[in-house]
Amino acid sequence: MPPSASSRSLRAISRMSSSELSRLLQVSRALASSLELDDVLQTAIESAVGTLRLDTGAIYLLDGDDLVLGATTPPLPPDFPEALRRAPRDGHPHVARCLAERELHSLEDWTPEELSPAEREVCEARGLRSLLFVPVLVADDAVGAFIVGTVGRVRALGEGDADLCRALSHEIGLALANARLYESLQRSQKELEQAYDATIEGWSLALEMRDDETQGHALRVSDLAVELGREMGIPPDGLVHLRRGALLHDIGKMVVPDAILRKPGPLTEAEWEVMRKHPENGRDFLRKVSYLEPALDVPYAHHERWDGTGYPRGLSGEEIPLAARVFAVADAFDALTSDRPYRPAWPEEAVLLYLGERAGTHYDPAVVAALLRLRQQSRPPS
């Protein structure tokens, strides 16, 4: 049985000199510096060209029957046409051969060789002379190839170059496998978060269907809260949790009886006691869902007041989580600027005046000031 590509790579490494091993270690460290696929590919081809002391190179990934250009050195310009980054494998028989045989191939001087039209076009356009075609292997499967060579000069490519290429292929394959695994995990995480957020919006809609007065309120106020939170300097991760908390700010009302929630007249003191428990009900419900724990601040603390007269804990000032302080202002603004069955929407100027009068008692003055700035910026110039 012929030796596997992995064992050929290990044998190549065992034959390398200490200086070659040192260069290979530097390549390995460089490849380990990032898990982003584009960075790995660029580092890979630059490392291959530098380690082999050649002039130029390109790395391709296999996509079905096509070769997709991953990176080059020198790098291609940003506006390089996408259409030219993909080519049929059959049009590049030397690359196809190294992929099929999982072994490198070299051309000390391509000019007397028979090349395909596509290969000749590339060589002539870049002034190439000596070339090495090296498969990139992951667990003995060919997933791509790198091509390195000289420009305008012929260089003999010996067994030492071949050993370096095999070792580089091994290192690049490991880095590529790690980058693809990371990319897959990132994609899975994003898809999972999208599913979570769709579920949250579904819960929010279910809440609003119980309360005819607030249709569309949760989505509007969550958008405004995120905008206001950004103005207050909340980092991107915090804005994600702020949005989720805003959408679920009244999740605790799910256990409030319809007779209380939809009562047309004023609530009795006993009914208010039930209603005031909804922040704690929301906390108890959401803390059972681990990914929603960072979003608890809004459902649990959005009825606290700056002066300490709110509920359920009577927090004051900066004891109230910033996300809850931001949401409280956004919530009041949206509620007052929206039509309700019992009153028409207030003019925006009146709402801003109302919030300004209650800054320092009901609301965080800094958040109210941030809202005023945002609203001023959104107005068309007079």
Image (cartoon, rainbow, N blue to C red):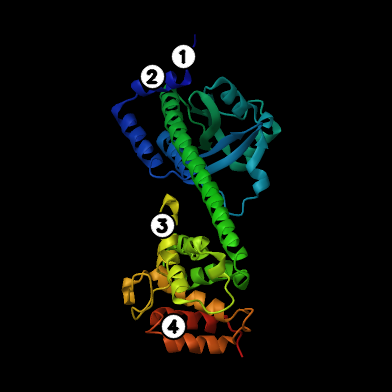
In the rendered image, residue 201, in percent from the top left (x then y), is placed at 57, 58
Give the CA distance from mark 1 to mark 4.
Answer: 72 Å
User: What residue is pinned by disc 4?
Assistant: 369
Indicate the amino acid at tag 2.
Answer: Arg
Secondary structure beneath label 4: helix
Which residue is the extreme one toward the right?
A: 117
Give the CA distance from mark 1 to mark 3.
Answer: 61 Å
Task: Give the number of the disc on residue 284.
Answer: 3
Query: Does residue 312 appear to the left or right of 208 in the view shown?
Result: left
User: What residue is pinned by disc 2?
Assistant: 11
Neighbor class of circle 2 (other Cα within 10 Å; few <14, some 14-19, many 20+) is some
Give the CA distance from mark 3 to mark 2.
Answer: 61 Å
* Contact, mark 1 vs mark 2 (Cβ under 8 Å): yes
Q: Is residue 237 above or below residue 25?
A: below
Looking at the rendered image, the disc whose residue lies closer to the viewer, 1 or 3, is 3
Earlier residue among tags 2 and 4: 2
Quarter occupied by residue 29: top left
Indicate the amino acid at tag 1.
Answer: Pro
User: What residue is pinned by disc 1?
Assistant: 3
Indicate the amino acid at tag 4.
Answer: Ala
* Contact, mark 1 vs mark 3 (Cβ under 8 Å): no
Q: Residue at x 40, y 63 (%)?
A: 280
Earlier residue among tags 3 and 4: 3
Looking at the rendered image, the disc whose residue lies closer to the viewer, 3 or 2, is 3
Give the CA distance from mark 2 to mark 4.
Answer: 69 Å
Secondary structure beneath label 2: helix
**Nearer to the camera, 326 or 179:** 326
